[in-house]
């Protein structure tokens, strides 16, 4: 079985020519690629998840209304959507530059937290969240498309494995940031914690360190051969992709899931801070529960989607999200609230990689980055209004109104999953699953 030796042994990123003739990547390189990108994804989501725990402090410090906070996150989501467009173009046209795109992504995360830490002005804070959102979004096209190319026969699992890194970052960030903000008192040892500005500036460090690791590991190691495509070929493939009903339907599906996720997560934090009067640490621990169970359920749902199909997994998961969100109407404090958040965490973020895999199933080889860009850009732009609407609802009808709003969004997503056009999984997947 002939293998073209074009991959760099240290970097773990292989070119298209470095694939085994039957389409399967070398095991050693494949595992290093998956684990390396997943680890970076975890750092990225640590920064993305940390901002939620800073929300009550920012809201109080800047004297913001619920709608103003919702507006900040709407601007972030819109920025996330727009950032996907250049990321998708650059990924498909210059695939050998994937490491550089990942480094730029983390540099934007660092800059976003630097601006948050020094801002005392609402509009500068809005800009900071937009920079942060752009940084977190720039990661998607290069990372997801690389995995889609390397693992066509196990696409659902590859997407889920990558997202498990995100779940780890999402889970550890809230509890750790809550501890840094709230401090602790244990066995006579007391620490009052740090201010939210100091915590924001501390969050610059892991992002900068990740940039340095990427640049030092991949500098001068790119393999440009067979990586670039002509502008004409790219435009032709992109036009075909933008007329693809399966990819467009998954973009709408992603928007519905994201709108539900962002709205319930943001106003759960505000509810626990303003109504339940939870400490920063207690809020952080509870938000961690929204993703803790997902560390195990994300790869499980990915494997199930490879075996049973994307449609039933998506429909069942979104229906479960709708039911579990409605449970907050009675599980409004104490252990019922905690248990409901754990249950919601099984599905809330875990279904996202299955949606990505469904989009990849309908994508021609060579335009994977653009497909991811369409998915995340469309999803973020369509769903950007949800936090503002949720903020208005929270102002007039309190958290119960937000719960009903989010449950309706998830229910619409579940119904749409039953009828949405979807492509076929790659040939050879069934044989791979039998091994």
Image: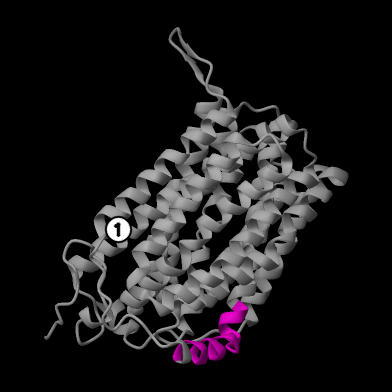
Question: Is 153 left or right of 292, judged from the image as shown?
Answer: left
State the residue at coordinates (46%, 57%): 105
Region rendered in magenta:
233-249
Q: Give the main secondary structure, helix, strand or loop, of the magenta stretch.
A: helix
Q: Secondary structure at mark 1?
A: helix
Q: Residue furthest right?
A: 396
Position of residue 195 measured from the top left corner of the image (x, y, whole percent):
57, 25
List the residue tagged with mark 1. 35
Q: Reply above or below: 305 against 364.
A: above
Which sits in the foreground, 177 or 15?
15
Q: Is residue 341 magenta?
A: no
Position of residue 50 measured from the top left corner of the image (x, y, whole percent):
53, 41
Q: Quadrant of the C terminus?
A: bottom left
Question: Is 284 left or right of 404, judged from the image as shown?
Answer: left
Q: Is residue 241 magenta?
A: yes
Q: Quadrant of residue 268?
A: top right
């Amino acid at each position: 079985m002939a293998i073209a030796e074009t991959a760099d042994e240290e970097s773990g990123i292989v070119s298209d020519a470095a694939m085994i003739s039957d389409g399967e990547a070398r095991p050693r390189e494949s595992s290093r690629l998956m684990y390396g990108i997943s680890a970076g994804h975890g750092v990225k989501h640590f920064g993305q998840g940390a901002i939620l725990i800073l929300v009550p402090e920012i809201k109080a410090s800047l004297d913001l209304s619920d709608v103003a906070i919702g507006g900040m996150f709407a601007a972030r989501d819109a920025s996330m959507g727009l950032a996907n467009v250049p990321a998708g173009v650059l990924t498909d046209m210059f695939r050998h530059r994937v490491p550089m795109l990942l480094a730029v992504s983390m540099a934007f995360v660092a800059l976003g937290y630097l601006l948050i830490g020094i801002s005392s002005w609402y509009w500068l804070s809005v800009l900071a969240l937009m920079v942060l959102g752009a940084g977190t979004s720039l990661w998607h096209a290069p990372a997801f498309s690389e995995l889609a190319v390397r693992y066509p026969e196990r696409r659902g699992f590859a997407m889920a494995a990558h997202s498990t890194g995100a779940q780890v970052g999402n889970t550890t960030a809230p509890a750790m940031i809550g501890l840094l903000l709230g401090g602790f008192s244990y066995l006579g040892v007391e620490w009052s914690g740090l201010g939210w500005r100091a915590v924001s500036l501390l969050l610059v460090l892991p992002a900068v360190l990740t940039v340095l690791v990427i640049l030092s590991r991949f500098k001068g190691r790119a393999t440009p051969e067979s990586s670039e495509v002509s502008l004409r070929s790219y435009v032709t493939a992109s036009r075909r992709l933008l007329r693809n009903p399966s990819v467009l339907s998954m973009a709408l599906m992603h928007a519905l899931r994201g709108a539900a996720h962002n709205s319930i997560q943001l106003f759960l934090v505000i509810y626990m801070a303003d109504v339940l009067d939870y400490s920063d640490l207690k809020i952080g621990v509870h938000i961690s529960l929204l993703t803790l169970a997902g560390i195990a359920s994300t790869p499980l749902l990915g494997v199930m989607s490879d075996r049973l199909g994307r449609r039933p997994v998506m429909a069942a998961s979104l229906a479960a999200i709708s039911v579990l969100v409605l449970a907050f109407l009675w599980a409004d404090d104490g252990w019922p609230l905690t248990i409901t958040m754990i249950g919601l965490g099984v599905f809330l973020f875990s279904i996202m990689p299955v949606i990505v895999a469904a989009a990849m199933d309908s994508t021609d080889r060579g335009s994977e980055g653009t497909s991811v860009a369409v998915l995340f850009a469309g999803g973020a732009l369509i769903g950007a209004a949800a936090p503002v609407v949720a903020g208005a609802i929270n102002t007039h009808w309190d958290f119960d109104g937000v719960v009903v709003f989010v449950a309706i969004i998830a229910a619409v997503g579940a119904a749409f999953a039953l009828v949405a056009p979807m492509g076929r999984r790659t040939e050879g997947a069934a044989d791979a699953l039998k091994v």
